Amino acid sequence: MVPAPVGAALGQPLGAPAPRLTDGATALAAERAGRPSGGHGRAKACRYPPRPYPTVLLGFLLLACPIAAEDAAPVTPASDRATATHSFADVDQWSKVFDAPKRDTWQKPAELVAALGIHPGQTVADLGAGTGYFSRHLAGAVGPDGSVLAVDIEPTLVAHLRGRAQREGTANVVPILGSADNPRLPAGAIDLILIADTYHHLDHRTRYLPQLRRALRPSGRIVVVDWKPGELPEGPAPDHKLPPEQVVAEMRAAGFTLVGELDLLPYQYCLVFQTIR
Ligand SMILES: C[S@@+](CC[C@H](N)C(=O)[O-])C[C@H]1O[C@@H](n2cnc3c(N)ncnc32)[C@H](O)[C@@H]1O
């Protein structure tokens, strides 16, 4: 593995020279050129459950071994259902969970957002924004000339997001009431969609995910942060979790390819996708 700072690799448009490391972007380039990427073989050495934390000396690294979608079961309408379907309508209850101060120690929102290579003026979406835990950090990254489209399907949370943006002075956060089958994002407008702890809540993903593709700009990225398999000190029960190989397979079926993985969080994987052209 030849690690490189994520800012260098993730900030690059797809047409730019390949980064030094053999990462998802290199696999994509090989795929485009009709060569096997070699990702499958290396992925076998890149298994979850996770490495001990912290494993990375300098923080944010792209792994050299992309997760192989081929390792997952085929994507079928029966396998793409949400694994957790409970309500998040109770703002007080969920604020205590999502905005608990101790969450920062393992969720590392500032480090995660910094590692995403977001530029001032960009338009990003926080899909499944919840109480706005990540929206606030995203708002700082895009700055006053950018926008954070904070989508949730719970009207109570969308109202909370609006109030929170006013209280915190983040006028660039735009709450959007989505629905389970429609994120209600504008077409061709989004530079980055963050799906944090929400992917496994998305239902009928084979139908849903292509809508995210339509919302992205050509160079846009989708970042999926979700739970590593198994029993962990934080996060949902193991049967609510989706293995990263399944996420990669579903995203591939929807027209996205894995271009990188951030090895930053102890309990969650962080997968970066771009549109397949
Ligand atoms: C576990 S919470 C994560 C909240 C936030 N991303 C965070 O990390 O603090 C999942 C959120 O996704 C929302 N959600 C579930 N399905 C959704 C969908 N199809 N579109 C948008 N939001 C959804 C829920 O209402 C809930 O607020």
Image (spheres, rainbow, N blue to C red):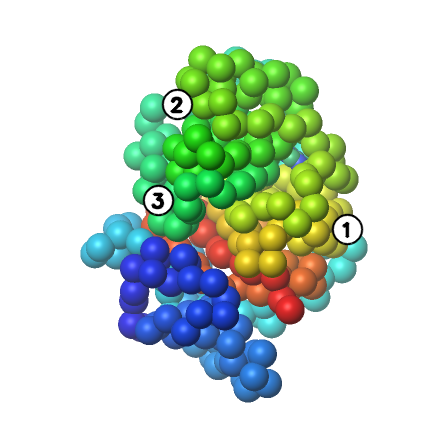
Q: CA distance from mark 3 to mark 1?
A: 31 Å
Residue pointed to by mark 2: 100
Q: Residue at x 44, y 70 (%)?
A: 16
Give coordinates of residue 90: x percent, y percent: 60, 16
Closer to us: 67 or 113: 113
Q: Is ligand 1 closer than 8 angstroms to the Cβ of mark 2? A: no
Which of the numbered marks, if any, corresponds to residue 37?
none
Residue pointed to by mark 3: 114
Residue 182 visible from this viewpoint? yes
Tell me which amino acid carries mark 3: Ala
2 or 1: mark nearer the eye: 1
- From the image, which quarter does the N terminus lie in? bottom left
Residue pointed to by mark 1: 207
Tell me which amino acid carries mark 2: Ala
120 to the left or right of 175: left
Q: Is residue 209 above or below residue 234?
A: below
Q: Residue at x 30, y 59 (%)?
A: 5
Crowd tier of the residue under label 2, counting other residues whose Cα lies within 10 Å: few below 14, some 14–19, many 20 or above? few
* C-beta proximity under 8 Å, tags 3 and 1: no
Q: Quadrant of residue 162?
A: top right
89 to the left or right of 224: right
